[in-house]
Image (cartoon, rainbow, N blue to C red):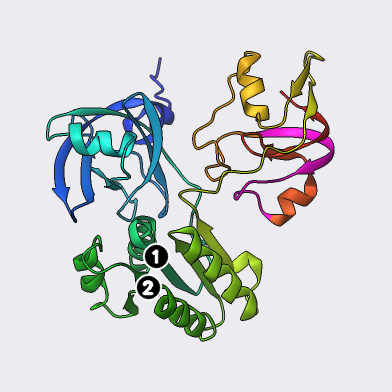
Amino acid sequence: MTAVTAAHLHPAYVTRARELTVAAVTPLTAAITSFELVAPDGATLTAYQPGSHLIVTADGKRNAYSLLGDGANPRRYQISVLRRGGGASDWLHDNLRVGSTVEVEGPRSMFAPVLNQRHALLIAGGIGITPILSHALGRLRSGGGAEIIYSYRPGHAAHLGELRSLARRPGVTLHEVSGRATTAELLRRRLRDQPLGTHAYACGPASLLNTYQQFARDAGWPAARVHLERFTAPEPDPGEPFQATLAASGEVLSVPAGVSLLTRLLEAGYPVPNLCRRGVCGECRIPVRAAALEHRDYVLTDEEKKAGDAMLCCVSRGQDIEVLL
């Protein structure tokens, strides 16, 4: 009898929770540290699309961190982590050393490049350079060009040497800028002067992303060519109370103002995957039927919101909701 090995059993296809070993810890700035992770046996890790993230469990909390690199046949994963004044990110800074182990899940993709794009405009603010650098490396691997805008405070830039090295290669342009007004003016000009077929990608603080979206609209960009990734989102208002019916059991859950449907589902014993609880990661997307949905997330496209057959239950609300779980 011929032995058959399922492809998904190969270590280079694994995305479930597992332990990786810290191979390098490199301070990049006073507040940003780079961590390189490898398989304990040195095996090739799961490949990923540029812009993907890794979920890391730190101090009992699961956080997503963007992966650097182009994602092709990686032997190591690299993440760069900003200290935020408490929480899991600070725990990584204070506790991970070379030889330490850490639990990860993924890689997962929520910010992937469009494969048939003719050109890429890549925009980063602060620590948002991590997925943008991954996009730039992916463009070079595929033989394409890119224009990169990096806005940062002097002395707080990460991976600047790598970016400047990339800018010496044909087809890559790098703009370095500091200050909100100067950044906004550069975004306005560059969004108005791109070749046909360009897709734009941005990651950074909310103020940068809001400016980027507004100037893209002003310049006539189709929404399908304007991509972004948010690290955080503002706390939503409490909203109105509502009820949700579980299609499989007929159970009705009452969701008070200020409480999410995700919380009520977890309390009722439904193990809905979740991570950010702010509507930016997409982990808690669930299928629904509803008379009216109040979408509050930053993940679903306008078309998906109009379809009304899915919601991010950590922030979104509605009326006459039937959850298809």
Q: Residue 8 lies in what quarter of the image?
A: top left
Q: Are marks 2 and 1 in contact (CB under 8 Å)?
A: yes
Q: Is residue 201 left or right of residue 251?
A: left
160 to 276, vertically: above or below: below
Amino acid carrying mark 1 in the image: Ala
Residue displayed at 38% across by 64% down: 125
Residue 194 in sight: no
Amino acid carrying mark 2 in the image: Ile
Give percent across and percent down for residue 186: 43, 81
| Residue 295 painted magenta | yes
Residue displayed at 69% across by 39% down: 316
Circle 1 Cα neighbour tier, 10 Å, few/some/many (<14 / 14–19 / ≥20): many
| SS class, disc 1 | strand
Give percent across and percent down for residue 36: 21, 43
Give percent across and percent down for residue 236: 62, 44
> What is the C-alpha distance between the residues marked 2 and 1?
8 Å
User: Disc 1 designates what residue?
Assistant: 124
Q: Mark 2 or mark 1, which is nearer to you?
A: 1
Residue displayed at 38% across by 56% down: 131
User: Disc 2 designates what residue?
Assistant: 148
Q: Nearer the viewer, residue 47 or 148?
A: 148
Q: Quadrant of the N terminus?
A: top left
Residue range corresponding to the magenta coloring: 286-301
